[in-house]
Image (cartoon, rainbow, N blue to C red):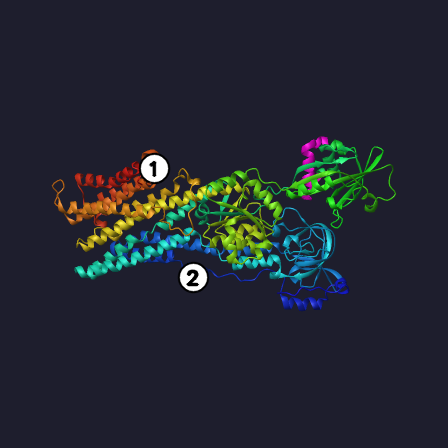
Amino acid sequence: MQKKWIEGENKLNKGLTQLEAEERLEKYGENTIEQRKKKRFIEYLLLSLKDITIIILLIATILSSYVAWKNHPDNFSEPLVIFGIVILNIFLSIRQQKKAEKSMEELKGFSIPETKVFRDGQLKMINSTEVVPGDRLLLELGDRVSADAKLIKSKNLLIDESFLTGESEPSEKDEGYQSMPEDSIGDLKNKVFSGSLVVSGHAEAVVEQTGLHTEIGKISGLLTEEAPMQAPLQVRMQKLGKGLGGVAIGAAFLAIVIGIIRGYSIEVSIMTAISMAVAAIPEVLPVVVTISLSFGIRNMAKKKTIVRTPAAVETIGNVSVICSDKTGTITENKMTVEKIESVLSNEKPQTKSELLLNFYLASNLSEEQGEHGNPTELAIKKAAEKHFGKRNLQQKLAQYDRIEEIPFDSKRKIMTVFYKKDDTYFSVTKGAYDRLPIAAPHSDYQKIHDDLASQAYRVLGVAVKEYSSFPKHVTSEFLEKDLHFQGFIGIIDPARKESYQAVETAKKAGIRPIMITGDHLLTAKRIAENVGILEPGTKAMTGFELGKLSDKELSAIIHDYRVFARTTPEDKIRIVKALQENGETVAMTGDGVNDAPALKAADVGIAMGGGTEVAKEASDMVLLDDNFATIIEAVKEGRRVYANIRKSLYAMLGCNISALTIVLISLVLGLGAPVTAIQLLLIKVVADGIPGFSLSVEPAEKETMLRMPVSRESSIFDNGLLRKIVEISIVFTILTLGTIYVSRTFAIQGIRPSTEISDTMTFIVLGLSTIVHMYNCRSTESIFKVGLTGNKLLVMTTLLGAVTIVLLTIIPQTAGILGLAVLHLYQWLFVFAVSMIPLIYIEVKKKLNLF
């Protein structure tokens, strides 16, 4: 921890000597947040190769290569395709690993190239990396602060710290402020922080912390330390890969043992083992998952959501909690006058028009400044323009001659403007009510003020004073006393109009919205109540209160809370992790630098398009319209993608398990392997893989947004999928074994039974029944209800697959390579009829509501 250098006044007047600065630079290092060298490509590659899915795919590549070498050495297309999948998976893995490094690069954008310091009693401009603890900074309008520092003296100093605090208004600074233990960053009025911007006034400050010890440096450290969460889909696919890998190895070993016991040659046993291993490994499944995610990414882009991490497409669909920032996400990020309360003034209540005009007159506004300036004064300007109309307002203002302005002062907390109208003179003063020197204060004034403040408004009062002639002294001491109070305005950053509906939709979908903000508790609660986040029976907490809790205590009570205010970046990460400890899948929205570590820690980090690049680089997806409601559309798309991946799994594993079972039973019965490895690979690509891709474009089913999210601990086979896969595998197995029995026992159309004809019919039945089964996988509703041609891509790919299987069988050259025999008409009719049975079977179950 760096020592906080607080020097004596004489020393501060001169600043550090160059020698002292060099010694401290040597001791504490440069004022930079860069801390780690980039990894080399080989390091990324080795880390990616630890992934179980990639390992299994590499094994599949080797097995496929061996099969190709043994059966058709002139055609290695299958192992090349599988190896292409390996390359794709490695690319996505490396891209994910490099995200944190990119976030760190963007953080450097908040460093300041040069800064003004006093050295050897002279004001110098130096490189900000050379700033050290104890340096005396000069801060002026437009400057970015180069290090965390304590104010020595200041005048009218306003600092934009929104990237750290999330507050929409600049922070008023006061070197005399005495900090309290419960103060958050936004409360420390006597300090300025690295990366913040001076929007008003000037100051001198002594540097306390530099580099990684600054608040932005701590965020940098959190980004570096926080390992990216594995998406639930990645975890599920890794578990599936491990399981199928174990099945493949076990099946291959079992095939060799059975082959030896049955007296087969070693070569035949090894070839059968390869067939079984190939049957167990769904080579094209990772590609199907990738295509499903890519299609989801494209759909989300159409709805103004840019996905940066493909797996997040599925994860967003199953989030159970959305931790949302307040400012700019739930709210408009525009201060707005919502309340105008007049009081009796000289026994005559002010009208709304008179009150608004006086607030405008007591401000430093002009038509030319547009949308830039102090947010409070801009709110007054917009309210007045809306009430009077721009043209009418300018006509009214033309009647007043602005003579003198006494600007806002953070100590006085008021400002005054002196005017002449016709032959009269008057002044208008606005500011904090308790600082207005009112001639005849009334208890009702305080009551109105307190009522507005309790509703989380920023409350300002306005008062006037008239003069019979031009005063001798136009000073604050003369003008700002014995004022006639006129009334209040209440200003707030209001909730977006669509936020309430978005929150309601989220709750119906089983998603719990939580607000995490750096703003004050009262303001946060007010907004959260307005949009439906804070409901009866739920609670709110400050960052100070959260800091008193251990991680275990926080995890135990976090389900009761919907609002967390005055939070730090560390608080946000603790909240996210506490929710994850409770089994929640968490999405975190944000736009500031202070949000970046929590965006990275969450299962899905969602940055706002108008936010900082740091937040975007730490996120998984970016909302281009900064609209909370867009997240709900992303959730719907994510649920569609996950459902379609499960449909593809249903289609593929049904084929895989039945093929494995068929080969194993045939081997035990001494029938040999009825399908070879190359035949299985063709079925899995032509009949299973390519049509399986088409399921990725299936539209979302009804009630998608009314079901509960899938728990991160849930298996991908939950909710009956495993039962369906096993059931259809049994159907496939019975049909195929039945085909083997019939074709080896009975003559069809006078053709004597043979092993070659039996194996050919087995190949066709397994392929065509798999293709037909694709239509079972589309929906829980009948195919006749959803329509046979509802998915045109599926129609095209299944027709292509069926035609390919038929052509491979009837073309002599390909039939010879694959070891297939010529079939006659009744044999073709038989395999076609048998292949339709899975569709009929599932349709009957759907009709009986048993599916």
Q: Identify which amino acid the numbered label 1 is placed on.
A: Glu
Magenta part mainly helix, strand or loop? helix
Determine which of the numbered discs, if any, sits on residue 46 in the image. 2
Q: Is residue 283 left or right of residue 536?
A: left
| Image quarter of the C terminus | top left
Q: Alpha carbon of mark 2 to alpha carbon of mark 1: how far?
A: 46 Å
Position in image of residue 102 (x %, y %): 53, 55
Tell me residue 716's x, y (percent).
37, 49
Residue 762's spot in the image, x, y percent?
A: 21, 46
Label 2 secondary element: helix
Q: Amino acid at mark 2?
A: Leu
Residue 834 in view of the camera: yes
| Res. 365 in view | no
Specify which label sits upstream in the sequence, 2 or 1.
2
Q: Position of residue 697 (x, y in %)?
A: 39, 41
* Residue 256, picture quadrant: bottom left
Residue range corresponding to the magenta coloring: 368-393
The residue beneath circle 1 is: 781
Magenta stretch holds residue 385: yes
Q: Nearer the viewer, residue 283 or 498?
A: 498
Q: Is residue 374 left or right of residue 247?
A: right
Label of residue 363 in the image: none
**Within-10-Å neighbours for mark 1: few <14, some 14–19, many 20+:** some
Q: How many marks?
A: 2
For marks 2 and 1, give the one nearer the viewer. 1
Q: Residue at x 62, y 59 (%)?
A: 214
* Nearer-the-camera pick, 510 or 230: 510
